[in-house]
Image (cartoon, rainbow, N blue to C red):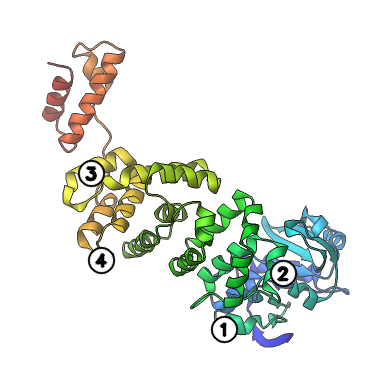
Amino acid sequence: MSSTARKVDFAAWPFAAQLSRLLDVLDGDGEEARVVGGAVRNALLGVPVHDVDVATTAAPDEVVRRATAAGFQPVPTGIEHGTVTVVIDKHPFEVTTLRTDVETFGRHAKVAFGRDWREDALRRDFTMNALSASRGGAVHDYTSGLDDLDGRRVRFIGDARRRIEEDYLRILRFFRFHAAYGHGHPDADGLAACIDERDGLDQLSRERVRMEMLKLVVAPRAAPTLAAMAQTGLLLRVLGGVPYLAAFENLAKAETAIDLPPDAARRLGALGVAVTEDAERLAQKLRLSNAEHTRLTAMAENWRRFSPQTGEGPARALLYRLKEAAFTDSALMAWARSQASDHDAPWRALVTLPRRWTPPAFPLKADDFIKRGIDKGPALGAALRAAEAMWIAADFPADTSALDRIADAAAGL
């Protein structure tokens, strides 16, 4: 199958004007350009289109020449593989010359430039990602991608094992795309190939694995997809430890219950962290950023401190100490690991405390203790810390008399 009756409307996309100008330059004078991949897939599914990639029969040098002549900014981001990033009004488009594989060995495939749209489509990963749309919006399908898109099937193009051997990251992409776009069980042939080729995961950089996992955990069907990965042993291999699938699913439900958008680091914590050693292992296994590592460590250290039974006073103290982000992460983790449902009113009230109450700034200053005879130095710091603890225990009073009593007590008066 090639051209179909399906069409996509470029005019409804972000940066439609810039895309139109790019196609005006690349599509003509003996060359053809089409929008390819994810933008076409998402448009047909009714999913927002954010990034637009273009494929062309023009060689990279010709793309650069035409873009320059049109006043665009061509950047040779991967020109040895046929990719030029063309910037129009500060918006980048990745433009790639049609290719055919000469030799494949993971990410370092040797390619030759070509002019055959079908051959270019057949070298891609999944059928739903091999769709292209010509300048007028007509969709071209060489791999039965439309049928798979309609059936919400994530299916490798051709022989699944060969596709995976070309790039072992496709194992994780298979599950990530299923979590995002698939329905039902993962494609049986694809799943079997992922299991057979699982040793290839060890060849991947930790950064690339991290990127795929952070995308997977926020996908709409992340929970059942992660369960499928766990059943095959692949998830244990990726995380380096036992996954907490129930906690992950419960946290995702709790996020929805309180209208929080999915958060990748928080969900990764629910999936893989119970104690601080888990946070350290994931940080090493996936080469997490410092910020992600810090969040997972805070979740591990604090989630056991949360319970609706402790009352709102202690919860306010936790919010003051942890700040809003860490409070929300840890409270959601505790809710997910409790026996409560995502409709539980006390847990909802606890987790949403930051929406009702903003922690005040500690009102006492060093001068309040110096005038009470405390010298600068360690004694002053100790008095400030003691006063702050008393102020928190008293539920953050603001009146002068209460603050004076706290300051006097902390100063030993």
Q: Which residue is mark 3?
A: 316
Q: Left of 320 or right of it: where is 210?
A: right
Q: Amino acid at mark 2?
A: Arg
Answer few, some or many: residues within 10 Å of disc 2's Cα (few below 14, many 20 plus, some between 14 and 19).
Answer: some
Q: Secondary structure at mark 1?
A: helix
Q: Secondary structure at mark 3?
A: helix
In this view, the mark in front (1 or 2): 2
Q: Residue 291: where, in percent of width, then height?
A: 48, 42
Q: Secondary structure at mark 4?
A: loop
Sequence-earlier tag: 4 or 2: 2
Find residue 65 and report its image quarter: bottom right
Q: Amino acid at mark 1?
A: Asp
Image quarter where the N terminus lies is bottom right
Q: Which residue is mark 1?
A: 150
Q: CA distance from mark 4 to mark 3?
A: 22 Å
Judged from this view, the residue extending furthest toward the bottom is 5
Q: Which residue is mark 4?
A: 343
Answer few, some or many: residues within 10 Å of disc 4's Cα (few below 14, many 20 plus, some between 14 and 19).
Answer: few
Q: Which residue is mark 2?
A: 162
Q: CA distance from mark 1 to mark 2?
A: 25 Å
Q: Residue 157: where, in percent of width, then height?
A: 69, 75
Q: CA distance from mark 3 to mark 1?
A: 49 Å
Residue 337 in view, yes or no:
yes
Q: Amino acid at mark 3?
A: Arg
Sequence-earlier tag: 3 or 1: 1
Sequence-earlier tag: 3 or 2: 2
Q: CA distance from mark 4 to mark 1?
A: 34 Å
